[in-house]
Image (cartoon, coloured by chain):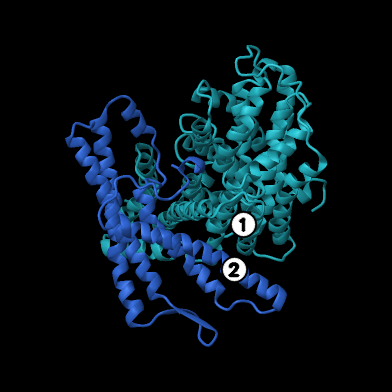
Chain colours: A blue, B cyan
Amino acid sequence: MKKAPETRLGGDDVPEPVTLLTPITSLMNTVGAVFVLVMMVLVNIDVFGRWLLNTPLVGTLELTEMGVVAVVYLTVAHAVAGKRLTRSEALLGYLERRGIRRVEMSLRIAFNLVGAVVFALIAFGQAPRVVDAWTRGYFKGNVGIFTAPTWPLEAILFLGAVAACLQFLVLAFRRGRDLRQGAG
Amino acid sequence: MGGLEIGFLSVGLIVLLIYSGMHVAIALSLVSFLSVTVQRGDPELAIRLLTLAAADGVADQTFAVIPLFVLMGMIMSASDVGRDAYDVGDHFLRRLRGGLGLATVGSNAVFAAVTGVSIASAAIFTRVAVPEMLRLGYSPRFAVGTVAGSSVLGMLIPPSILLIIFAILTEQSIGMMFFAGIGPGILLSSVYCLGIISMAYLAPSFVYDRTGRFAEPGAVDIKVHRGPAEIAAKSLPILFLITIVLGGIYGGVFTPTEAGAVGSLAALILAFARRKLTLARFWDVLKETGHLTASVCFLVIAATMYTRSLGLAGVPVEIGNMMQTATDSFLLVVLIYILVILFLGTIIDSVSIILIMVPLFLPVVQGFGADPIWFGIITVIAVEVGLLTPPLGMACFVIKGCLEDKRITLGDVFWGAAPFALMMIFVLALLTAFPDMVYIDRWFGGR
C-alpha cells in the first residue's frame, strides 16, 4: 500500500542491508532517480527549443519512451526491498494483531517466494531478448534522424528483474528466520 | 474449460490472493501466467507473453506523464504550497459558519490542480488544517473528515494519476480525460461546501466541539492580520503553475507529457527561488518519485499481462454477451459496476481496482453506447469512495498516521469521513442521471 509521502520520504530506508545486493540495488535506484531528472530536462529542452528557437531536440520521444521503462526497472528492486510494492495489509495486519504469527509469517514467506518466481520468469524470458538486441543491433528511432540501440534498455530490464527476484528471496529468507525464532 | 470459466476463475483467484495480502502486481502476473498456460498448455508461450508485457507494458511516451506529474506534485508538496493555499482560504472564509471547512475544501481543490495524488493532499492538509480547526473549536471528527473528503479532489481534478491511467488503459486522450475531470471536480467541491454549511447550521454538534477539550480559549477572537501583499505572495505561485499546466494543455501549447515536464521545472524554480526546498530534500523527492513510478508502472505492466490473458480467453466479449442477454437495463449494469467497485474499494487500492475492473466492464458499457470518458469519471469517483471507507480507507490511514493529537482515533477519522463519502455517492448518482454534466462546457446547455 502507498504510505504517507511525508513519513516515508527519503529512499534509503531499506531495513537490514545485505552485502553486495543492497549496494547494487541502491545504486540502481539512484540512477533511476537521476533518469527522472534527465527526462524532465530533456523534455524541457525539447519544448523550449521548439518554442523559442524552432529547433526541437531530436530523439526526445524515443529517449523518454525508453526512460520510463528504465526508471521502472531501475527502482523496482529497491521498492521491493523497502516494501513499497502495493499490497493489502488487511488480513496480515489482522493476523498480526490477533497474535496468529505463524500463519501470518507463513503467508508472507509464500507471497515473497511467489514474487521471486514471477520476477525469475520475467528474467528468464528477458535473457534471450538482451542477446538478440545485442547481436542483431536492434535500435529505436529513424535511420538518419535519430537512433538509439535497445540493448542497454533490455539489459536494465533483465538486471532489474534479477535484482527484484533476489530481494524477494531475501525477504522470504528473513521471514523464515523470524518463523524459526518463534515469530518474535 | 471454456474461456468464460477461465476468466471468472482467474478474476476470483486474483481478488482472493489480493485480499489475503499478496502484492497486487505479483498476483496479477502470476494468475495471468497460469491462465495462459492452462489455456494453451504451453508454459513457454506464457513466459513469452509475460516478458513481452514486462517490456512493452509501459514503453510509450505517454507513460512519461506519470513520473513527471508525480515529480511536480512532490515538489509542490515539499515546498509548502499546500499550506499557502490553505492560508489564503483561511483568510477569506474564517468568519463564516463552518468557514474553515470551506477553506479546507477550497484550498484542496486548488492544490489538486497541481498534484495528482490524493494521499499527498491528505498528508499535507492533516498537518496544516486540522490543528487550526481544532484550535478554533471545530470537532475533531469534522476536522479530519473534511480533510479526508476533500483529499479525494486530488484524484479527480487534473492532473490526476488515476485519470492518466484510465486514459492509457482505454486508449482515450489524456487531455480529454483531464478536461472531463474539471466539471465533476467543481461539482463535488460545491456539494461538499453546501454540505458543510448545512451541517454547520443543522447539526452543529457534529461540526463544533462543545466540550472545548481541543480548542484554545479565546482563539476565535484573535485576529490574524494578513496584508494584501502576503495573500498575493501566497496565491500567485500556485495560480501561475495552474495556468502553465492546464492552460498549456488546453491552449494547445503542450502535450500532457510536456506540461508535466514544464510544470515540474517551474515548480522547482519557484521552490528554490522562495527557499522552500533544499538540495537534499529535492534528492529525496526524486527518489520518492522513482519509487512511486515503479510501483504504479509495475501495476500497469501486470495489468497489461492480465488484460491480454483475458482477451486470449475471450472474456470481454463473452461478458458483454452475457450481460446483454441477462439485462437490457444500462442503469442496472452501471449500478452493479459501482457496487462491485465500492466493495473492492474497501480493501484494494485505487489503481489496482481500475486495472482489474475496467477491462471487464468497458466493453459492456460500450455495448450500450456509453461514453468512455464519462465512464472513466464515474469509475474514478467510485474508486475514491473506497479511500474513505473502512476497513482499508487509505486516505483515513494516512490522516491517522499524520495526526499529532493522539486522542483522535482511526474510528473518528472514518466517522468524520462518512458524510463526505455519502456526498460523493450523491454526486455519482447525479452524474449517472445526467451524463452530460461530466463536460463543463455543456453545463449551460451548449455543446
Q: Could you tell me which residue is drawn at 40 percent across and 70 percent down?
A: A153
Q: Could you tell me which residue is drawn at 40 percent across and 48 percent down?
A: A85
Taking depth in this image into account, of B307 and B149 the one nearest to the observer is: B149
Q: Which residue is mark 1?
A: B268
Q: Chain of mark 2?
A: A
The image position of residue B239, as x and y in percent, is: 74, 50
Of the numbered discs in the image, which one, if any, rests on residue B146? none
Viewer can see residue B359 = yes
Amino acid type for the residue under numbered disc 1: Leu
The image position of residue B130, as x and y in percent, is: 61, 29
**Is B155 above or below relative to B210?**
below
Q: Could you tell me which residue is drawn at 48 percent across and 40 percent down?
A: A7
Q: Dot 1, how many residues are within 10 Å of its Cα: few (below 14), some (14-19), or many (20+)?
A: many
- The reply, left or right, for residue B113 in relation to residue A28 is right
**Is B378 above or below relative to A32?**
above
The image position of residue A157, as x and y in percent, is: 37, 65
Taking depth in this image into account, of B331 and A58 the one nearest to the observer is: A58
Q: Which residue is mark 2?
A: A43
Amino acid type for the residue under numbered disc 2: Val
Viewer-nearest of discs 1 and 2 = 1
Taking depth in this image into account, of B287 and A146 the one nearest to the observer is: B287
